Every structure is written in C-alpha cells, then in structure tokens.
Image (tube, helix red, strand yellow):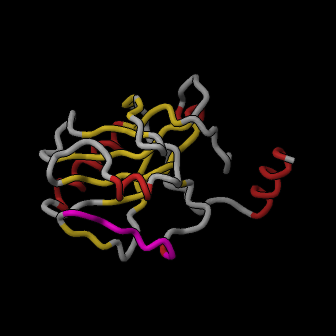
Amino acid sequence: MRLFRSSEIIGIAEDALSFVLSASEDAHPDEYMGLLRGEAASDLGLDRDGTVVTNVLVIPGTESNPVSATVKSNMVPTGSGRVGSVHSHPNGVLRPSNQDLQTFGRGKVHIIVGAPYGRRDWRAFDREGEPRELEVVDVPLPEDTFFDFTQADIDAELGDRR
C-alpha cells in the first residue's frame, strides 16, 4: 500500500460523489462540509497516474448553519490522505465565496455542491478558486484500510523519497 499519492487529482469515484450529494441534501438547509480523501488511480485498477477522490472524512465537531460550515482543525486526523474539501451551498450558488477561498489553501481540489443536490449540481475548483474538470469514475472502492499500515511501511515509503 502506498502512503503518498500522485499529486494530480484526476477524478472522483461515483460512490464518493453520491455520498456527497446525499449528505448535502440531508444537511439542508444547513451547509454540509467534509474533507476529501483519495487513492492512487492504479490501486483502483485504472491504467493512469494520479489520484481519485474515493471518500469523505466527516470530522467530529463540524459546525454548520445555513450560510457556513466550519471543521475543527484539531479534530482532523494526521496522515488522513486529505486531498481537498467539499461543502454545500444551500442557496444553490456553485461558485466559491471569499470566505470559501480562504479555506481552499489546503488540498488540491475543492467541491461545492448546491441545492437541489442533483447529479449536475456540483463544481470542482483548484485552491485558487478556479473551476477545474473532475471526471466521475466508476471504480470499486477499496476496503477501508485507513489505519492499516505499520512503521515499516512508513519507513519504506519515506526511503523511496530520499
């Protein structure tokens, strides 16, 4: 298992997008917010380099209301495989606000989902808030092995980078 992934985000798994749309609708009229995790495309059976968003970290203590959502950064696990963020705009506006841009600094891709939370009610942005393409890919998601690594795995991975 690779701990460090290619930096290019090439897509979002169909199941991850479905989760995001459903969670956003369930949170309505409040905003929904989560952090995106990714897996190497090659680990998902794709013959491509890059990373695919595979799931969403729901952070305990996230505060939400109709105009904002805030993740408590001290609750984000270290080594979370975080590649970006997702949040909803209950008003349906699919572009980042100035406040959104302030939170986009971490991660490579940021998704905004808008009411009514259908298949076309989302957009992806880079960390500067510029729209970007994000392909929806139908891949089987791996078993949840978030903490399934050892210190030897970490040492081996870091040794490859030195």
Residue at 21% of width from left, 69% of height from top? Answer: 65
| Residue 55: x %, y % from top left | 42, 50
| Residue 60: x %, y % from top left | 39, 74
Q: Quadrant of residue 50?
A: top right
Single out the residue that lies furthest toward the top: 47
- Left or right side of 162 for 23: left
Does the magenta-highlighted stretch encompass residue 68?
yes
Residue at 32% of width from left, 42% of height from top? Answer: 17
Residue at 55% of width from left, 56% of height from top? Answer: 145
**Foreground: 74 or 54?**
74
Q: Is residue 116 above or below residue 43?
A: below
Q: Quadrant of residue 66?
A: bottom left
Residue at 50% of width from left, 69% of height from top? Answer: 76
Does the magenta-highlighted stretch encompass residue 98?
no
Q: Is residue 74 above or below residue 96?
A: below
| Residue 99: x %, y % from top left | 35, 58
- Left or right side of 136 for 153: right
> Magenta residues?
67-74
